Amino acid sequence: MKVRYSYLPQQFGQIHDLLDAIAKFVPTGDFTLGAPLREFETRFAKLIGAKHAIGVGSGTDAIKLPLKALGVGHGDEVITAANTFIATVGAIAEIGAKPVFVDCDDTFCMNVSQVERAIGPKTKAIVPVHFTGYMTEMEPLMAIAAKHALPMVEDACQAILADIGGKRAGTWAAAGAFSLHPLKNLNVWGDGGVVVTNDDAMDKKLRLLRNHGMRNRDEIEILGYNSRLDTLQALVGNWLIDQTGDITAKRIANAEYYDAHLGKIKGIRIPPRQANRRRVYHLYVVFAERRDELLAHCVKHGIEAKVHYPIPLYLQDGLRHLGYKEGDFPISDAHATSIITFPTDQHLSREEQDHVIKTVREFYSGR
Ligand SMILES: *Cc1c(COP(=O)(O)O)cnc(C)c1O
């Protein structure tokens, strides 16, 4: 049996109504900042429970543009999580700022108790990453940020519809960043991103920044970027957005099924599942003894298991200039050798999940 990581052909298998909408849209020529984009932004803001949503070119830009709007730039330091995906760091670096890492904990998010010692005179902002679909401990982090007067941008790219006590990822900080990349929980047919904010001034600035800083066709208010969400992708987003709740619920149900069965296997440890939190399992990650052997065993049995990520970000060649050395972030290091990601796509069947569970069980029982 083959258990795939992603099921994009199935997800976009029945799209006659979407193709009809595209056929109607193309003759309008409304390709940049078009009416369907406005519709998508309104619906996205409503979905998240934020006042504004601004469509941008990618999830990376959804982090970069609000940082820029907050005045972060050359020589500034931005605190983020040591175990994040490279895009978070790329967004910080693109505006000339320096990423400063804080180690994660076993929820794969920044260990908030270590943030204060990373704050220095050059610190200008904090970017918590709600990694895998867990949320960063926002309540204590908000208190630290307020004490030091540091604005925050949430990297919620893996955490659409996650929440703490009902308050959603992306709505805590000055702005929240989402990605619409094909592998994300709400996905389109290419790159795309969305920023949400409750701040009218931030909304206005982001709309300028994504469109060359143009107030109108003839006047440039500030220097900006070319980073608009394609109107065509917004049509895909409009087609899909009402399914986000069901997609999320299915991924959570898949994760709970895995937890109940994998949790009984000696050799597997389920990460802490705190109460009063909604985790949305962009990635279903557990700790595994003899991880590399288990991974090879799963792949051999047709399971597209993965590791996010085998090389800690702070030790990557491309980030050597930051000056970090092995051992600086021991929890991130430990995760790099002990975590494994099992497929948790919303299209997975129980039979496929049972195949994963059986394969893992057989590995540890030596059969
Ligand atoms: C996907 C992702 C991003 C943004 O990626 P894009 O490919 O630019 O949309 C940022 N941060 C994290 C943690 C991500 O997983």
Image (spheres, helix red, strand yellow):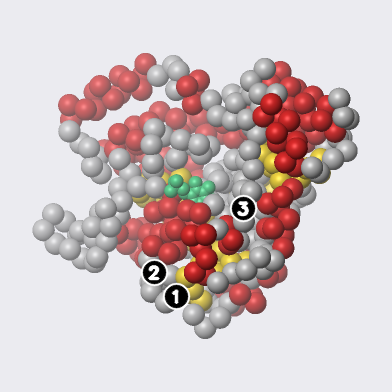
The answer to whether marks 1 and 2 mark residues whose Cβ atoms lie closer than 8 Å is yes
**Looking at numbered disc 3 in the image, what kind of residue is underneath it?**
Ile
Q: Residue at x 57, y 46 (%)?
A: 159
Q: Report how far apart the C-alphas of labels 1 and 2 lie in the structure.
A: 8 Å
Tag of residue 96: 2
Nearest the camera: 70 or 52?
70
- Considering only order in the chain, which callout, 2 or 1, is on the residue closer to the N terminus? 1
Q: Report how far apart the C-alphas of labels 1 and 3 lie in the structure.
A: 26 Å
Residue 60 image point, x, y percent? 43, 52
Q: Residue at x 21, y 27 (%)?
A: 26
Where disc 1 sits, the SS reads loop
Q: Residue at x 57, y 43 (%)?
A: 161
- Considering only order in the chain, which callout, 3 or 1, is on the residue closer to the N terminus? 1
Where disc 2 sits, the SS reads loop
- Considering only order in the chain, which callout, 2 or 3, is on the residue closer to the N terminus? 2
Q: Residue at x 32, y 20 (%)?
A: 19
Tag of residue 311: 3
Where disc 3 sits, the SS reads loop
Which image quadrant for residue 69?
Answer: bottom left
Residue 276 image point, x, y percent? 72, 49
**Looking at numbered disc 2 in the image, what kind of residue is underneath it?**
Gly
Residue 332 image point, x, y percent? 68, 58
Q: Is residue 168 above or below residue 191?
A: below
Please name the residue that numbered disc 1 is placed on.
Answer: 76
Q: Using a 10 Å C-alpha cutoff, classify the residue at mark 3 as few (fewer than 14 neighbours), some (14 to 19) or many (20 or more).
A: some
